[in-house]
Image (spheres, rainbow, N blue to C red):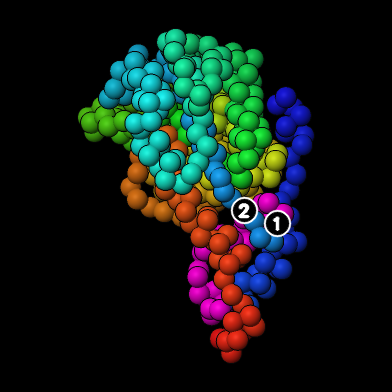
Amino acid sequence: MLADTLASLQPIDKTIADRVLAHLNRLTKPPGSLGRLESLAVTLATITGEAFPRVTPPGVLVFAADHGVAAEGVSAFPQAVTGQMVANFLAGGAAINVFARQIGARLEVIDVGVAAELPGQAPEFVDEKVRFGTANFVERDAMTRAEAERAVEVGIRAAKRAIEGGCRCLIVGEMGIANTTASSALLAVLTGEPVANLIGPGTGIPESRLSHKQAIIERAIRARAPDRQDPMDMLAKLGGLEIAAMTGAYLGGASRRLPLLVDGFIATVAALLACRLNPVVRDYLIFAHRSSEPGHVKALVALGGEPLLDLELRLGEGTGAALAFPLLTAATGMLADMATFEAAGVAGGEGT
């Protein structure tokens, strides 16, 4: 499945951009006066191949998994919180539930590696557990390469379900205690940046514990020695099951020409991994917001991403992307519903 998905990825349709831009310049406004909303409309058209793209309904995919490195005290919360938060998602009480309802999203919560048995009675719950959390990557590889590939394929299948459910845009979120540690380790290998430039408070650890988090990550990178040219090796040695699944969701969504609205730090690291597996994915990415996590800025730079929002968020779950989604609907609505100068009988046009 992974090999087939990678092979099926196609470049976006850049030929449509001039046609969409010409239409934008005929709308009743000075050319370019709606700023980045206009460039967003062009981007959505090139991604979908439609002059009047549609992005509703969106699909929100939240992948949950645990990390063995949590045993090293790198998080402010105990590992049990991952499973507890999944229960909160299924009860409809988390931030992503609130925001998903507001934008009319199809929500799915996927257990790809929570270190506990989950009841899974809610219709939006999917049990695709690859294993009960990763190993502590300070001591040994987080998972086998085969497990990493299985987790990526969990994400590809989730994207396919969302598309078959009618979704026209994907928001990929996560839940996993200690996953900022895994993401920082992956990003350090992917970019060559010093770990000290990438780590932040994550779930809220105090400043005094950041040096410990840094030391743990540096020790793990030395011990695991991942191949910088091999994203799957990086995922197997330093990654998380939910990060691998998110990577797969981006691949699956791009293979079906869906706009991929990228959330914060962890989501952007997963997107970077997807782009290393196939660079074509980059053109399908729209960056929702700039997180307050230091590593997020570095991940955005690595992808050449310019976020739509900067709200000092650091929650994850896909919340920042859900908050940015109305900008996509505004861009498509402008294209489809705004009058042209000719139709409105307004003097002007491109010279206005």
Please, what secondary structure does the residue beneath circle 2 have? Answer: loop
Please, what secondary structure does the residue beneath circle 1 have? Answer: loop
Q: Is residue 339 left or right of residue 185?
A: right
Q: Are marks 1 and 2 in contact (CB under 8 Å)?
A: yes
Q: How many marks?
A: 2
Badge 2: residue crowd in 10 Å (few <14, some 14–19, many ≥20): many
Residue at the spot x=63%, y=18% of the render? 150
Disc 1/disc 2 C-alpha distance (Å): 8 Å
Q: Is residue 211 left or right of residue 308?
A: left
Residue at the extreme bottom of the image, as rendered:
347
Look at mark 1 in the image and give the residue it sits on: 50
> In which quadrant will I find the N terminus?
top right
Residue at the spot x=38%, y=52% of the render? 310
Q: Is residue 73 above or below residue 169?
A: above
Residue type highlighted by circle 1 = Glu
Quadrant of res 39: bottom right
What's drawn in magenta, residue-wise?
Answer: 28-49
The magenta stretch spans residue 44: yes
Look at mark 2 in the image and give the residue it sits on: 54
Residue at the spot x=55%, y=31% of the render? 246
